[in-house]
Amino acid sequence: MTVGLPSADEAGAYIWLDHDAEETWLVEEVAARLRRGDELCVAEQDGGLLIRWRGADHVSPLTYSPHDRYITLSSLAELLKPAYRFLLLKETLSESQHGVLVRPAEEAPAELPPHLIPLQQGLDYFEPGPLTIPYLDHPAPGFVAQSRALAGERVAAGEEMLGLLKRDPEVQRALKALRREAGRPWWKFW
């Protein structure tokens, strides 16, 4: 283990980010890991998050989509650099929750241990392919078109899966049994 950096199994050291996380919660979690005097304040406003740091207000964009988690994280990384580094727990990037580590820059050496990678600002790591996202002072031309295309792919994949399930005789038998059970009066379940 590199001095100052937790191992992969020290779960309490990480912020656990998922698609359901609120952006204000994320800012508060990052703020809890900053040094004394580097407080962050956050408030929602039309079209973005108002983040105050060191007496200055900054607006992180919001798209009101699942991409907002990494838009907010990239915005915070941009705002707090070079004082802090944002690192990702590599083994969690294929999971539904990603481990995020925020450290003062002097505690994060240039050569990271193999379980950590630096956050590449402007990428949504929840997406299977590279999706460039906007963040603080960095618009992302083509983001809306890319995001819509990904959403269309997800809908098509869901419809395909539903079609497969409808044709599967085992699934149909299970559904029929569930419908029968659901039609029984409550007192016949015991």
Image (cartoon, rainbow, N blue to C red):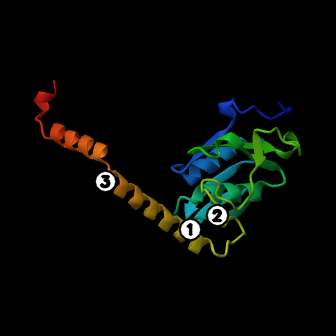
Asked whether 72 or 156 is in front, the reply is 156
Residue under pointer 1: 147
| Label 1 crowd (10 A; few <14 / some 14-19 / many >=20) | some
x and y percent of residue 99 in the render? 66, 41
* Residue 105 seen in the current view: yes
Mark 1 residue element: helix
Q: What residue is pinned by disc 3?
A: 167
Q: Which residue is mark 2?
A: 131
Judge the density around disc 2: few (<14), some (14-19), many (≥20) Cα neighbours within 10 Å: some
| SS state under label 2 | loop
The residue drawn where x is 57% and y is 48% is: 25
**Of residues 25 and 152, the one drawn nearer to the viewer in this rendering:** 152
Residue found at x 19% / y 43%: 179
Label 1, label 2: how far apart the Cα atoms are: 8 Å
| In this rendering, position of residue 83 left or right of residue 73 | right
Distance (Cα) linking label 3 and label 2: 34 Å
Assess whether mark 2 and mark 3 are in contact (beta carbons under 8 angstroms): no
The quarter of the displayed image where residue 189 is located: top left
| N-terminal-most mark, 1 or 3 | 1
Mark with earlier residue (1, 2): 2
Residue at horizontal 68%, vertical 64%? 135
- Label 3 crowding class (10 Å Cα cut-off): few <14, some 14-19, many 20+? few
Please state the horizontal and vertical placement of residue 53, each as a whole percent of the image: 73, 55
Could you tell me the amino acid type at mark 3? Arg
Image coordinates of residue 108 in percent, x first then y, are 84, 42
In front of the other: 91 or 187: 91
Q: Secondary structure at mark 3?
A: helix
- Check disc 1 and give the amino acid type: Ser
